[in-house]
Image (cartoon, rainbow, N blue to C red):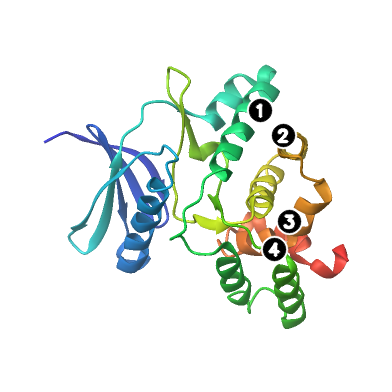
Amino acid sequence: MSKKELILTRPYKKVYREGDRIVKVFTKEHGKANVFNEALCQARVEESGFAIPRVLEVTPIGEEWAIAIEFVEGKTMEQIMKEDAANLKKHMEAFVDLQLSMHSKTAPRLTLQKDKFSRKINSLKDVLDATVRYELCTRLDTMPNHTKLCHGDYNPSNVLVSPDGTMHVVDWAHATQGNASGDAAITYLQFALKNQETADLYLDLFCKKSDTAKQYVQKWMPIAAAAQLTKGVPEEREFLLRWADIIDFQ
């Protein structure tokens, strides 16, 4: 049996390398259904033809559940952007190109993006008042319905770059079929939480390469901010609440 090497710890999971596989072990509080749903999402993305690490199995480990996925050698795009900051634009272009390649695919059996956004907005009763939730849901209803493959958490830490330059997108727990600009709004906000200039560079390149008006992506941002709020990260709360206050953006 291959030796396990701990490579990542999160409040609800630990991620190990075990030979030619990655094993995500989730706490029992995360719930069996959530673990199976993540594996199912990734399997449905595989059906789209977009090249990603394959799910190998879902298995119990005591009272916890684990997902085994193909191991991919490489650095994250986040590491590369930090280590080679002088060439940030070049790396960002590759990052955006990969996202657009993903958006060119469809995965008809994935959850609808609008349904997922709606559930997240309506779960924020202790965070957003009824007026703000109503305005967010009203805007969401008016946005165009698309069926593009969307990651839902696309950021440089979820892109692995192999030594030969091949890029792989990982962590598909939030995957949906929906609107590319809604997906881009999430990515923009994740950049903006760390560095506004990098976020602006991302948005400039995404809009230029996809021929999308910035104003259109910006219309999605209060919705995306509400979705991000459901993660409950304390240091992100104030920033995201400003973005989610849709009345300020009308």
Q: Amino acid at mark 2?
A: Lys
- The reply to whether discs 1 and 2 touch (Cβ–Cβ < 8 Å) is yes
| Residue identified by numbered label 1 | 93
Q: Are marks 3 and 2 in contact (CB under 8 Å)?
A: no
Quadrant assignment, res 50 = top left
Quarter holding residue 191: top right
**Residue toward you, 111 or 153:** 111
The quadrant in which residue 168 appears is: top left
Which amino acid is tagged 3?
Phe
Which residue position is annotated with label 4? 223
**What residue is disc 3 on?**
239
Mark 1 and mark 4: span between their CA atoms?
A: 25 Å
**Numbered disc 4: secondary structure:** helix
The three-letter amino acid code for the residue at tag 1 is: Glu
Mark 2 vs 4, N-terminal side: 2
Of badges 1 and 3, the one in the foreground is: 1
How far apart are labels 1 and 3 at the CA level? 26 Å
Residue at horizontal 27%, vertical 54%? 66
Sequence-wise first label, 1 or 3 = 1
Element type at marker 1?
Answer: helix
The furthest residue to the left: 1
Rounded to the nearest whole Å, what is the CA distance between mark 3 and mark 2?
28 Å
Residue 138 position (above or below residue 225)? below
Which circle's residue, 1 or 2, is located before the other in the chain?
Answer: 1
